[in-house]
Image (spheres, grey):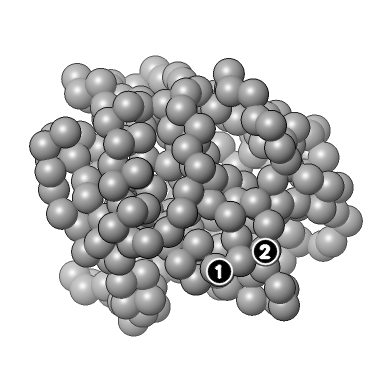
Amino acid sequence: MVLYQPNNGYCYNSDTHFLYNFIMENLKKFKNIKGELLDIGSGSGILGLLISRDNNKLNLNQCEIQKSFQTLSSINSKCNNINTNMYKGSFLELNFEKQFDICVSNPPFYHSNVIKSENENIKIARYNDSLPLNLFIKNVSRILKNGGKFFFCYDVKQLNEIIKLLSEYRLNIESLQFVHPNKDKDATLVLVYARKNSKSLLKVLDPLIVFDKNDFTKKVQSIYKNSSTHSIKVEI
């Protein structure tokens, strides 16, 4: 999959690849994946495009606030022959004319009180000023069908708040996976799968370890191989 990215701006990173793999692993137990997929804060489009590539009965929808990324998403969907419906604007302000079977997101999750990049493109993509966690989860619950699936990644330090808010908005966590830089370090990222009004018990997947000394672990290497993405930097 060829993906154009901004030469001077936020680019997708390993978090998105790990989330893509987590989503695919959790979807394996379902025989017929179809319906409406929404990628919230789609950026250059990588997450929704990868999932659609591997589940061709899904109708891809994307939501993006930044005009430069709206343009890149359109370019990337066309060059990879995947149809998409782009919602332009803030996820918190848009009126969606339908509900969704699956919502996915690699949202901005850094606290607003940390030192920020001067690059406006990077600021919006990284820091949660424009998409606070409580409003993010509340709005996902509103647009998700009953029994709909919600996949996202977030800063592991905020897991207590994540659990509380998901429960408050009737989203039951069915699966978690923790991502560790290496086997001796604490997790830095949590991958979350929740379903609306589900009563299933929680399953914690084996931790994903990124590095073994200075090299990617075999698991991470296989994730990159399955993603099979090629990035091209452009001015936009």
Residue at left offset 45%, top offset 19%: 129
Amino acid carrying label 1: it is: Asn
Mark 2 or 1, nearer chain start? 2
Compare residues 200 and 182 and report the one nearer the observer. 200
Q: Quadrant of the C terminus?
A: top left
The mark found on residue 2 in the picture is: none
Q: CA distance from mark 2 to mark 1?
A: 8 Å
Residue drawn at x 27%, y 31% as measured from the top left = 68
At label 2, counting other C-alpha atoms closer than 10 Å, the crowd grade (few under 14, some 14-19, many 20 or more) is some
Residue 132 falls left or right of residue 3: right
- Disc 1 designates what residue? 55
Tag 2 residue = 34
- How far from the left and from the top, in percent, is residue 4? 22, 50
Residue 114 in percent (x, y) is at: 34, 22
Q: Secondary structure at mark 2?
A: loop
Which of the pair 212/177 is nearer the observer?
Answer: 177
Quadrant containing the N terminus is bottom left
Quarter of the figure with residue 170: top right
Q: Residue at x 71, y 66 (%)?
A: 203
The reply to whether residue 147 is visible in this rendering is yes
- Residue 205, can we see it? no
Q: Are marks 2 and 1 in contact (CB under 8 Å)?
A: yes
Q: Amino acid at mark 2?
A: Lys
Residue 151: % across, % down: 60, 52
Q: Residue at the spot x=69%, y=32% of the render? A: 97
Asked if residue 212 is positioned above or below residue 185 in the image, the reply reads below
Q: Secondary structure at mark 1?
A: loop
Mark 1 burial class by Cα count in 10 Å: few <14, some 14-19, many 20+: some
Percent of width and height locating residue 52: 50, 62
Q: Is residue 204 above or below residue 221?
A: above
Question: Residue 72 falls in which quadrant of the image?
Answer: top left
Pick the residue in front: 179 or 45: 45
